[in-house]
Every structure is written in structure tokens, then in C-alpha cells.
Amino acid sequence: MWVTSMPQIWDEEGVAKGAADAVTPAPAAAMLSSLAGWLSRTIQPQPPAPRVCGTEGGPPVTAPRVRLSDGRHLAYCESGVPKEQARFKVVFSHGFTGSREDSVRPSQEVAQELGVYMVGFDRAGYGQSDPNPNRSVKSAALDVEELADALGLGPKFYLIGISLGSHAVWGALKYIPDRIAGAAMMAPVVNYWWPGFPTDLAADVYAKQEVGDQWALRVSHHAPGILHWWMEQSWLPTSTVVAGTTPLPNRRDAEIRSKLKADGTFQHKMEQATQQGIHESYYRDMTVMFGKWEFDPMSLPEPPCPVHLWQGDEDGLVPVLLQRHLASRLSWINYHELPGTGHFLSSVPELGDTVLRTLFG
């Protein structure tokens, strides 16, 4: 029988990270620790080596790329007005399963009117950007900074993140706040183990997920070293998000996903995102987003720039209750809740225009 309750949140000294003062380690966390140790001693479940773009046997490089200080490359895609003519320069961080070609989808008329240059990029390990075996929230922010510098976006630029890609925005607000002119997050994924969430609230919404998603996140947090092995076992409960089978309460979301799966777009996007290895893209995303962060976003000081957050109240992937709590803890967050709206915000009519007009004040 699978244990489906949320593992209690605790640090190395056993001090609670939520509302309670101290908790006992949960059976699920203890089980994962034991399983990870056993696997490392016996099976040693190492993920396959990545098929790096541009190397022998790897996918070809077809997109423009910049070279980072550590030798990695980031592939990017530009849109909007020419950079030299732009009033506003925006870096866009795509979500889980996304790519450099994603954006907030503003109308061409509004992009031209405002003078917006936007660059999306394949996050590390996705598409045609080199993998980073040391990926973290901090490295995501520093990749954004290096991309902006390589493209000559100036001392300050705007940053937009969508869904899981918003961890780069949180990282930027922590590690490079002076470089950000303004930031927006659209349906940003949350980490249930952030200390600022009350334990009972986080546990309640966590338990409402599909059992496979609960376990995928547990492994990502408590035993990231075996996530690839876990996700590849058909007999274990694994992520419905990866499979594209998560129940979606919002009608628009459900219709969009059905259409994407029916016409092959869902499969094509997955193949492109994971062409260098699903471990380097999807699974590293999961261990970074749901792992142990170096900071709690709800403890960040007010940054020297405006920050906006958009969230649908019918989001089936990111619990609106946790987003409301986060926004209530951070008085400097400009929180925009969209009634009758789900997770796929880039498909909401005219929302992209609204995000840009709001972000630029």
C-alpha cells in the first residue's frame, strides 16, 4: 500500500519548517532515504549520458546560441521590435515542457506600440541549450544574467517567467535584483516545502494531487538521485504532469491539452524539449523546483523593482490557496487573480497584452 500523506517538513536538526515547532520524520521520507541508499549500493541507477547538441551523435544546432562563462551554450529566439529600437527589453523563461519559442503571446500591434523586444531561451538541458549537471535556482538566475549581457540588453532588463520557469524569476530577485527593471510571473509553480507555507495548508493541498504526482515530488525533494530511475519504472506511481494526464478542472485548459495531444503538438514539443535527454530537461527541472532551496521566497526583502504575479483560480496544476498565501506574505507582490481561469495563461485572450502594459507601468 502506498503512503499518500504528505511527508512532514523538517531539517537536519529535526526542527519543523512549517507552523509546528518540531515534527517526527515521516515514513515516506525515511523510506525514500533507505531506498536511495540501497539503490546506490546495488543497482547504481545512473541516468544515461546526455546527447549534447552539436556533438557526435547529438542533435544538430540550428538556433542562434550564446556561449556562457563556463563554456555552456544557451539557444535563444528573438521576437518583437528590433533590439536597437526597443524601449523595453524582456527575457522570457519558459515553463515545464517549453522552449525558447514560448512567450506571453502579445499582439503584434501592442508589441510595436510599446516598443518591446523579447528573447526567449531554452533553459539548461532543454532544446538546444547545453545541459548543466549543477543546475539550481541560482544558476537559472545567472544564466538569465549572462544571456542578457551577451545580447547587450543593458544594465537593467525585464524578466517574465511562466509556470515552472518562474523559479528563474525568484532566483533573479534573490541573486541579481539590481539587474531587474521589473518582473512578472504567470501561474508560477510553488514548492510545497517552502518554510513560509503553514504545514497544515501545504499538506492539505498536497494531498489533493494525484498519487503519482505526490510521489514524484517526494522523490524530487527527498531523494533526487533516484528520480530518473523512479520515473522510468512502470510499476511505480509517477508524474501525471509528464504523462499529460493530470485532471484539469478548467474547461479551457482541458480543451487546449486535448487539442495539443490530438494534433501531435504535445508529443512534438516533448521530443524537442527532451532531445538531449529527459533527465537533463524534465527531471532536473523537478529536482530544482521541488528540491531544497537555499532561500524561502516568502522571506525575500522587497526588491528595487515592481513584481507582478498572475494566477488563475481554477488552476489544476498550481494550488491557488498556496499562491494566495504567498501573495499575502509579500506585500510588494502585485497579485492578479483571474476568475474562471486555469493554468495555461499564455492562451488567455489578450492577457499577454495586459501583462506587458501592466509590467511597464
Image: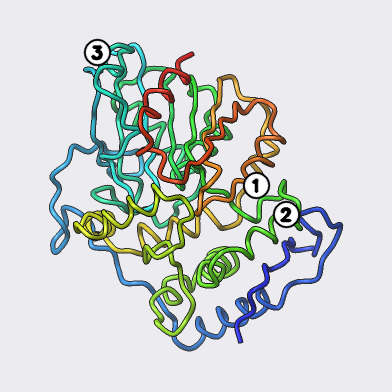
- Depth check, mark 2 against mark 3: the one in front is 2
**SS at badge 3:** helix
Mark 3 Cα within 10 Å, few/some/many (few <14, many 20+)? few
The reply to whether discs 2 and 1 touch (Cβ–Cβ < 8 Å) is: yes
What residue lies at 61% left-to-right and 87% top-to-bottom? 1
Marks 2 and 1, Cα distance to the nearest angstrom?
8 Å
Tag shown at residue 321:
1
Question: Between residues 104 and 315, which one lies in front from this camera angle?
Answer: 315
Instruction: Judge left or right: residue 167 versus residue 58.
Output: right
Residue for badge 2: 201
What residue lies at 69% left-to-right and 60% top-to-bottom? 204
Tag shown at residue 84:
3
Please tell me in which quadrant of the rendered image residue 280 appears.
bottom left
- Most extreme residue toward the right is 21
**SS at badge 2:** helix
Please tell me in which quadrant of the rendered image residue 291 appears.
bottom right
Question: Between residues 234 and 59, which one lies in front from this camera angle?
Answer: 234
The percent position of residue 30, horizontal first and vertical second, equals 68, 77
What residue lies at 32% left-to-right and 26% top-to-bottom? 106
The percent position of residue 160, horizontal first and vertical second, equals 43, 32
Earlier in the chain: of badge 1 and badge 3, it is 3
Marks 2 and 3, Cα distance to the nearest angstrom?
48 Å
Instruction: Judge left or right: residue 360 versus residue 337.
Output: left
Question: Between residues 312 and 197, which one lies in front from this camera angle?
Answer: 312
